[in-house]
Image (spheres, rainbow, N blue to C red):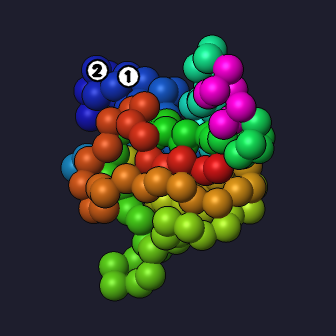
Amino acid sequence: MDLSKIKTLIDFVGRSNVTELTVTEKDVSVRIFRAAHPAVPIAPAQVSTGTTSSRAQDDRDASGVAQAMTVTVKAPIFGILHRAPAPGQEPFVKIGDMVEEGQTLFIIEAMKVFNKIAAPRAGRIKQLTDVDGGEVETGAMLAEIA
């Protein structure tokens, strides 16, 4: 295995949530690892904002704080999105489900490494991506939690 391939693998591990990667080519194995992070980093939560008109503000006040507390879960890395733990099984979550902070919502497969995507906070699933078994880009919206 040449040094440029090894550097590419190191860069991949550095940019992703992967904590360990082992690649074997012919009779050479390369193992790259780093300290695990306590949680999967998720893009900062996006808070929906109301308009400045008094009617919109009254509507927002009437619906409570929930509208302002919507969190968007985005893909932290590029890869294949899996909505269920295994083919043929029920998805981790469905629209309307209540989730706890840290609960697994999805798995993103990148270079044969399965990265769990956890809920950044407790709440109800308001919206989910249609992608299942397909590619997602870094920053793509996966779910909204209200």
Q: In which quarter of the image is residue 91?
A: bottom left
Disc 1 residue type (three-letter): Lys
Let me know if residue 23 appears in the view. no
Horizontal placement of 52 versus 115: left or right? right
For the residues bearing labels 1 and 2, Cβ distance under 8 angstroms: yes
- Residue 120 x, y percent position in the rendering: 69, 46
Q: What segment carries the magenta color?
A: 54-60
Helix, strand or loop at mark 2: helix
Residue for badge 2: 4
Q: Name above or below for residue 103 compared with residue 31.
A: below
Helix, strand or loop at mark 1: helix
Disc 1/disc 2 C-alpha distance (Å) = 5 Å
- Packing grade of label 1 (10 A; few <14, some 14-19, many >=20) is few
Q: Name above or below for residue 64 compared with residue 131.
A: above
Let me know if residue 3 appears in the view. yes
- Image point (31%, 43%), residue name: 136
Disc 2 residue type (three-letter): Ser
Toward the top, the furthest residue is 52
- Image point (42%, 40%), residue name: 141
- Image point (24%, 55%), residue name: 134
Horizontal placement of 75 versus 66: left or right? left
Q: Give me the disc on residue 7.
A: 1
Q: Name above or below for residue 141 compared with residue 123.
A: above
Please say whether residue 6 is one of the residues in the magenta stretch.
Answer: no
Q: Main secondary structure of the magenta part?
A: helix
Horizontal placement of 7 versus 123: left or right? left
- Residue 48 x, y percent position in the rendering: 60, 30
